[in-house]
Amino acid sequence: MTDIDVGGRVRVDRDRLLRILQDHGVHLGVAVLLLVNIAFTPHFVSAENFRTQAVQVAPVMIVALGMALAIGSEGVDLSVGSVMALSTSLLSLYLGYGMWIALIVAVLGGVAVGMAGGALVAFVGVQPIVATLALMVAGRGLALVLLPQLKDVRDPTMASLGSGDVLGVPYLVLIAAALALLVAFVVRRTTFGRQLLAIGDSRPAARLAGLPVRRVLVLVYVCSGALAAIAGVLATARLTASDPTSLGHLMELSAITAVVVGGTPLSGGRVRVGGTVAGAVLIQLLTATLIKHDLPPSWTQIAQAVVIILAVYAARERGRR
Amino acid sequence: MPAHPAGPAAVLSAAGLSKTFPGVRALDGVDFTVRAGEVHALIGENGAGKSTLIKVLTGVYRPDPPAAPGAGVLTYDGSEVEFATPLEAQHAGISTIYQEVDLVPLMSVARNLFLGWEPRGRLGLIDFRRMHREADAALRDLGVRVDVRRPLRELGVGVQQMVALARAVSVDARVVVMDEPTSSLEPREVVTLFGVIRMLRERGIAVIYVSHRLDELYEVCDTVTVLRDGRSVHTGPIAGLDRLRLVSLMLGRELGDVRDQGLTRFSGSHDTAAEPVLRAEELTVRHQLHGVSLTVRPGEVVGLGGLLGSGRSETAKAIAGALPPDSGRVVVAGVPVRTGSTPAAIRAGVSLLPEDRKAEGIVPGLSVRENIALAALPGLSRFGLVDEARIDRVVATFMKRLRIKASGPHQKVGELSGGNQQKVLLARWLAMNPKVLLLDEPTRGIDVGAKAEVQKLIDELADDGLGVLLISSDMEELIEGSDRVVVLKDGAVVEELAGDAVTEDRLLRAVAAMPADVPADVPADVPVDVPAVRTASGGDDD
């Protein structure tokens, strides 16, 4: 009697554990990595190091925010890395007309790519993975046509955008935080956000309920494109150079990882902004930990893979109940 | 466990079984026993615990740990068991056929039949020849003749169900659980199914049969267990059990009430003098509709009758903008509506409750609240920002008015019973203040109690001045619920019945497209998509 009771409790605990893992596992992971580093990594606890980590993670985080929207709509956006490259090319080309014009043109480039992807998905009915794969190839190509090789960016305002700070908090981090709050607000409090979740959960039901499915889908990819372009601009400012060959390379995978690890299901219908932010931080910390302990970079990739598998496992086990 | 009358040994039994979900006690000490060679009906309202019980019996859910020694245990074949997974239950000999066919649509019939235990030849490769031969034999056994090499999805739902059945039977099952097996079958296929069930009984296999269709139970079952609020309230032989008594057991209402109110809850006719609020003119969709015209007045319930495939759902979808017509007009309250656009139809005041509630109606992962507010969202927002307070008010109003049973507005809709899901959908549309409601099978798959409530709601809504177009395969519902009935056949209107002409006899003739002077008895082979025909005639036997 008693031991059966215990058995029952263990089972309940397992369910709860999985739920906690999916909902908060990413925060737990961040906390554990922080503690491990504080305990074992020399020079980890320093303002300088925290700044470096935060500045490095900011562009990934911004791209992941857009990716979370795309995944929430039961889609995916593979073009984000190429959009970053395109925006850095446009930025260099138009910097002669003034920084603000260059910034606007660069972001509009991302919007245009997003519009193309959204139109392919919403109006032509191409699967998101295929539509954005095409744009990923085309976008990188276009970026290289516009700017065939690396070019230094010698604009003092751009340089200060990349390295300046307010009260010790880098601009990059402030911008990323502001965008995260904005996206969270959009998801939670706007009709667009609600409609996006409904469309991601059940497209036929959303359609029959009279939702503007096509408009919402186009807007999702426009947001993702714009956010990726902003990330491209910020990365350019930090590096003070435009390198369309390598900027944003494999960024789509990092972004998807951050989103999935953050607990947003790939099946759509849910967007977890806080989780996505934490997911990006988790990946960053993981990489930093391994590098600081002089492990080869290939280990980082293996560690990332393990984290992804854990995240998907928690989500799947929970879905099975 | 109460001692049962003498008979074959119990194959599977549950004693004092409970199952608790967060906030809900779905099963509360249920006793249930099924014997070899017995067809045991399991009935109850939605939310009574039928699905949960079946899922516990078949290893999908685990029961709560026993509250007292001997209570809450599952006994199979004389020994206590605990199934950890559905597969374990299957290997033990408990096969389940679910309401929704769970097969692989792209694979061939034979591969589906043998999925997971394909006959192997040398090198461990699938022996296709043997597999096809055996699949063919297994289906022939059930009276189904199809090319077993064809992909499953090319076949009708009925045949798919037969494949699921053949699969269940051929894995040496000792208990076969059928969850509403007839809900998507044509009458001809139902006859075949019943033949199979009788065959299973002769082979000494125990069958647990869940259905909302009472006449089926009387036709094929031996024993019935009635569940209500997670408890078993009655178990006994079904022969000799009065139909009204059965219904009152399920509902927990007094016999007199049921008799007074009839089996449906429609109150009768509505005022039908006003100008039409909906006018569909010559709607034509290639291969589907051929010039369908109909009108609905405010406060009127117009039934849309016909066989499966006669174009009823297509008509509703064309009116609602979900199926673009090649020609024809839709006029709402005197104003033509752009066809082929759901948003345009909704703005004009047309709302469609789709037939496939799960796939096209609810958004399962969202809460009751978000589902109700979904269509009305732009109206409940300002500058694209959602007005939470207004949504709360609207949701509270409709949850109360439609008597939606949920643990709260934030419960996921996917967790509700079918009847309550349907009410959530109704609420979604009522929040839009529609002029016309198109209801496609609003009570299908929801049981007697919820059905009566939904029917009563439809009535109330018409009284409030809405125009209602009601599609139903339940002939009794169509007759009692509608003021007029438009009958379709092969995508065209064949007859319109009004007033006293709305009778079962006239409707049957119209549906079967028989002239009025031919004798009334409909030939048995006419595939009337109305199992309820028998209910209607048998509903008032004393």
Image: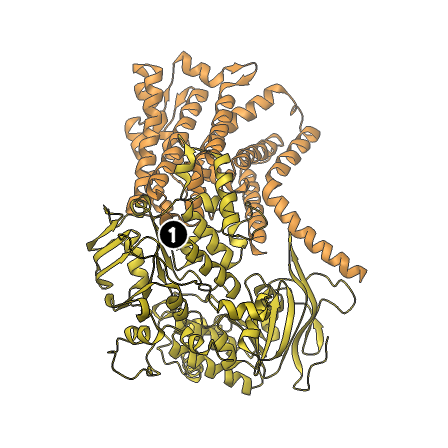
Which residue corresponds to the image point at 58% horizontal and 31% vertical from the top-left?
A288
Residue B59 at least partly seen? no
> Relative to residue B425, is residue B477 depicted above or below?
below
The part of the image, by quadrant, that contains residue B66 is bottom right
Residue hosting label 1: A204
Asked whether, in this view, residue B424 is left or right of residue A27, the answer is: left
Task: Give the letter of the chain under mark 1.
Answer: A
- Callout 1 secondary element: helix
> Relative to residue B197, is residue B328 depicted above or below?
above
The part of the image, by quadrant, that contains residue B222 is bottom right
Viewer-proximal residue among B298 and A18: B298
Which residue corresponds to the image point at 37% horizontal and 39% vertical from the top-left?
A216
The part of the image, by quadrant, that contains residue B142 is bottom left
Which chain appears yellow? B
Quarter of the picture containing the C terminus of chain A is bottom right
* Residue B149 in picture, x, y percent from top left: 36, 74
Residue B500 at least partly seen? yes
> Relative to residue A307, is residue B82 depicted above or below?
below
Quarter of the picture containing the N terminus of chain A is bottom right
* Residue B199 in picture, x, y percent from top left: 50, 85
* Residue B356 in picture, x, y percent from top left: 41, 59
Chain A: give its colour: orange
* Residue A12 in picture, x, y percent from top left: 68, 53
